[in-house]
Structure formats: structure tokens, C-alpha cells
Amino acid sequence: MTSRIKTLTAGFRARATATGGPEDGVVTAFTVIVTAALLVMAGLVLDGGLALSAKAKAESEAQEAARAGAQALDIGAFRANGQGTLTPGKAVAAAQSYLAATGDAGTVSVTGATVAVTVTHVQHTQVLGIFGLSTLSSTASATATAEQGG
């Protein structure tokens, strides 16, 4: 019985250590390449969608901050001459306050009755971070003008 076990064991060892033909490892290399390609494609789809969402969010935040700033009317000037002019300091403060609440960075400027806002939203990637791309930045600008209703 022991000779039969030795024969079987020797046969298993011979099969395990036998070298194959010239195609040894081809399936493994193919699998690695296809898996990496699929991972990159998944990253582009997922993180690309997140980048589009981040752009829309930046645009929305810029519009809302500009509207918040455009509401900072100079009430004294409005009562005196009926014109809707802005108080620049209050307009900038209102827009920056809105941006601070969103957590995104931005710049605000006031020219006459117009408030201009530029917002930068940083989106962290979900999959492309594996390949060294950990964040995507989206920038959007918007303006709002104080107008008198009629």
C-alpha cells in the first residue's frame, strides 16, 4: 500500500512541477490587463459622473451666492431716489456668507448693481484615486443684478 501512495505522490509532484508550453501564463497576463482596463473604465464612469454633478453644484452655488449678494440693497438710496443700488460691503459679505455655508471656496466682486461670484468645488474621486487622481475641481461663475420691480 505504501508503494502505491508513493507512486501517486510522485505523479502529483511531477504534474505540479512540469513546465508547460510557450503559452504558460498567457491567461494570467490577459486577465490582469482586462481587469485593469475594466477598473479604469469603471473609474471614468463613476468619477466622471461625480465630476458632472460637482460642476452642476458649483454652478448652483455661484448663482445662489450672487442672488444673496444682489439682495443687499442700499435702502437709504432707494428711499431717496428710487434706484436699486447695492451696498458693496454688505453684498460681498452676504455672498461670502452663503459660500461659507456651502463649504466651497469662491470670489465675490460688486460692480454697480451687479454681483459676480466664482465658485470652486472640489470633488473627491471614488475609484480614480487608485491611479493617483484623488480630487477633481469644478469652477463656475454667475452674476446677479439688483433690479427694481414694477
Image (cartoon, grey):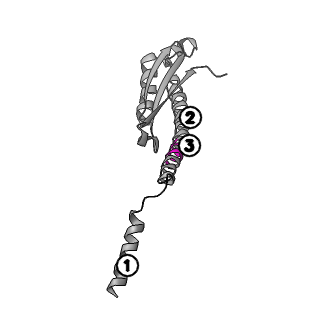
Q: CA distance from mark 1 to mark 2?
A: 71 Å
Name the one closer to the observer, 37 or 77.
37
Q: Which badge, 3 or 2, comes first in the chain's sequence?
A: 3
Q: Main secondary structure of the magenta part?
A: helix
Neighbour class for label 1 at 10 Å: few (<14), some, many (≥20)? few
Q: CA distance from mark 3 to mark 1?
A: 55 Å
Name the one closer to the observer, 59 or 147.
59
Occupied quadrant, residue 100: top left
Residue 23, x across and y down, in percent = 51, 52
Left or right: residue 84 compared with residue 6: right
Mark 3 is on which residue type? Val
Residue 97 inside the magenta-drawn segment: no
Neighbour class for label 3 at 10 Å: few (<14), some, many (≥20)? few
Position of the N terminus, as image quadrant, is bottom left
Mark 1 is on which residue type? Thr
Magenta-drawn segment = 35-43
Pick out the residue farthest to the bottom.
1
* Residue receiving disc 2: 56
* Residue receiving disc 3: 45
Q: Which badge, 1 or 2, comes first in the chain's sequence?
A: 1
